[in-house]
Amino acid sequence: MRIIAAVLIAAAPALAGYGSVVSSFLKENAIASRGLAWADGELVTTNIYPSGNHRWRVYTPAGSLTAWFYGPERFTAHMGAAYDGSYYWTGSWSENCIYRFERGGSVVSSFYAEYPNGVAWDGEYIWWNSYIGDWFHRCTTTGSVVSSWQVSQVTAGGDLAWDGIYLWCADIGSGYIYQLNTAAGITRSFKAFGHETYGCAFDGRYLWLSDTTNPTKTMFYRVDIEYSGPAVEPASVGRVRALFR
């Protein structure tokens, strides 16, 4: 009886609840994630590994590598990641620019953005934040600013994610993950699970985070955010429910 009980406990899922880890996996194959996106049922991460291997990686939710590809070839420090159903988005510190591109790196369009550190797609607009400030901007796909707002508690905002109701920000400065809206700023938060949590993505139910502890390995976490919105793909979720409009 004791053996059976031990097996059942070991097989039990992680404790549910806001901010709790549902699953995780570690990658040590020269991966330094600075942005996450959810694309067609898989997790996509940027990679700024300093050796020069900057290819983006594609993982299943269980952590199996299924593909890799290059981002825009004009720069290597891809900051933030988003997927709009057709194209990927990322930012460049060195060029003060946000790129929309095809898998493989071909640039479709770009626009000016000062030190972009995170991007998110809400179904119609692209959101981005700057590393040097606490401002968040909602723009058209050509870069025209629709609205901007400030959250003073965010000291060094990393990547962003949109769940159809809230914008999420992995704040590198405070080490917290913030749930945001334009009416009240921070609505909820929880402590990140590592020291350098940059990546942030929404998979339709859970929030994904990436924490790079050194230039060679990254831990990926799937986190319960007690999501109660529409069960649709993240690339189109903003067309269904968007409090930011």
Image (spheres, rainbow, N blue to C red):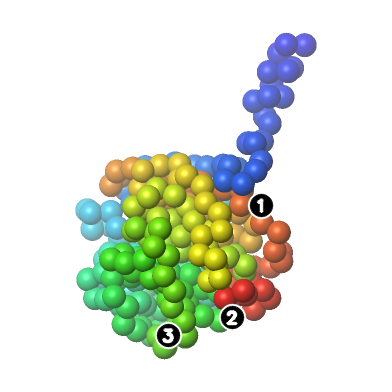
Q: Position of residue 243 (x, y in %)?
A: 62, 74
For residue 145, which numbered disc appears in the image? 3
Tag 3: amino acid: Val
Q: Which residue is mark 2?
A: 245
Which residue is nearer to you in this view: 107 or 138? 138
Other-residue count near label 1 (Cα within 10 Å), few / some / many at <14 / 14–19 / ≥20: some
Residue 89 against residue 111 in the figure, above or below: above
Count of numbered tags: 3
Query: Mark 1 falls on what kind of element?
Result: loop
41 with respect to 92 (left or right)? right
Residue 141 against residue 214 in the figure, above or below: below
Tag 1: amino acid: Glu
Instruction: Give the position of the N terminus as an image quadrant.
Output: top right
Other-residue count near label 3 (Cα within 10 Å), few / some / many at <14 / 14–19 / ≥20: some
Q: Which residue is mark 1?
A: 226
Q: Position of residue 227 (x, y in %)?
A: 66, 56
For residue 59, which numbered disc appears in the image? none
Q: Position of residue 4 (x, y in %)?
A: 74, 17
